[in-house]
Image (cartoon, grey):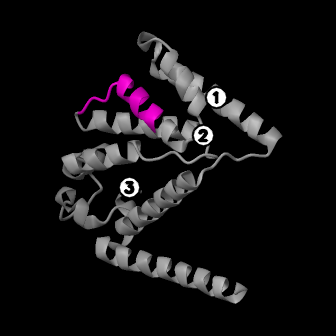
Amino acid sequence: MIVNSIEEKYISALCHPITRFNTCTPLNLMEHIWSTYGKITTLDLTANEERMYSNWNPPTPIETLYEQLTDGQQFAMQGGETIHDSQLVRKGYEIIRRTGLFTEDCKEWRKIPEDEQTFDNFKQFFTAAGDNRRKNSATNGSSGYSANTIEEIVQHQMNNILHVLNLVMGWQRAEMYFSSILLTIMLRSAVRTLRKI
């Protein structure tokens, strides 16, 4: 099954002229693929860091932020870099602060002694803060988004789309495609505005 899922050019070094891949175990295939193509480069580590520290977009559950940070930490470890939990706390705090939705909670977090500002305590504290914010915003009808926060969320989503297009199409084609999408959206918005006048 593995052989059918991988283009032969990537595993041709393991192909026997007569038996082909019949004598090759799945473990041999996976070890070959990992050792040949699975090396984590400095560019991969830089991209991982950018993904780790990209904005969190509420109302997405805060657990997605924790997952984003820990996934990045594990990827960095596989690439030979260590990202300590204290770094996750600092970066996670900054990401949450940038949302503009947890101003009072951030003040309270800063009052906690530094030796108690562990990643587990961070997750527990801001999970409770997020639950409290959701309950309060549901009762007062306020979403709490500022124009800057919305702009950051839109920019983040656009960057995610461009990144996926880049992976699929290559940078220049993705940029051209994305630019044409943005132009179409802008033109439609302009037409709607003109119709209202």
Q: Which residue is mark 1?
A: 129
Q: Is residue 8 above or below residue 35?
A: below
Q: Say if the magenta span includes residue 173.
A: no
Mark 3 or mark 1, which has the lower sequence index? Answer: 3
Q: Which residue is mark 3?
A: 2
Is 86 left or right of 136, judged from the image as shown?
A: left
Please name the residue shown 58% across and 55% down the image: 147
Q: Residues within 10 Å of mark 2 (few under 14, many from 20)?
A: some
Of residues 64 and 159, the one drawn nearer to the viewer in this rendering: 159
Mark 2 or mark 3, which has the lower sequence index? Answer: 3
Q: Residue 117 appears at what percent x and percent y?
A: 46, 17
The N terminus lies in quadrant: bottom left
Q: Residue 109 appears at what percent x and percent y?
A: 52, 22
Q: Which secondary structure lies at badge 3?
A: helix
How far apart are the alpha carbons under marks 3 and 1?
A: 46 Å
Please name the residue shown 50% across and 37% down the image: 97
Does the rendering let one see residue 28? no
Q: Residues within 10 Å of mark 3 (few under 14, many from 20)?
A: few
Mark 1 or mark 2, which has the lower sequence index? Answer: 2
Q: Say if the magenta span includes residue 84.
A: yes
Please name the residue shown 34% across and 61% down the image: 6
Q: Which residue is mark 2?
A: 101
Q: Is residue 46 above or below residue 10?
A: above
Of residues 81 and 87, the one drawn nearer to the viewer in this rendering: 87
Per the rendered image, the range of residues in magenta is 81-94
For marks 1 and 2, give the one nearer the viewer: 2
Q: Which secondary structure lies at badge 2?
A: loop
Please name the residue shown 40% across and 29% down the image: 90
The C terminus lies in quadrant: bottom right
How far apart are the alpha carbons under marks 1 and 2?
A: 10 Å
Name the kind of residue labelled 3 in the image.
Ile
Q: Residues within 10 Å of mark 1 (few under 14, many from 20)?
A: some
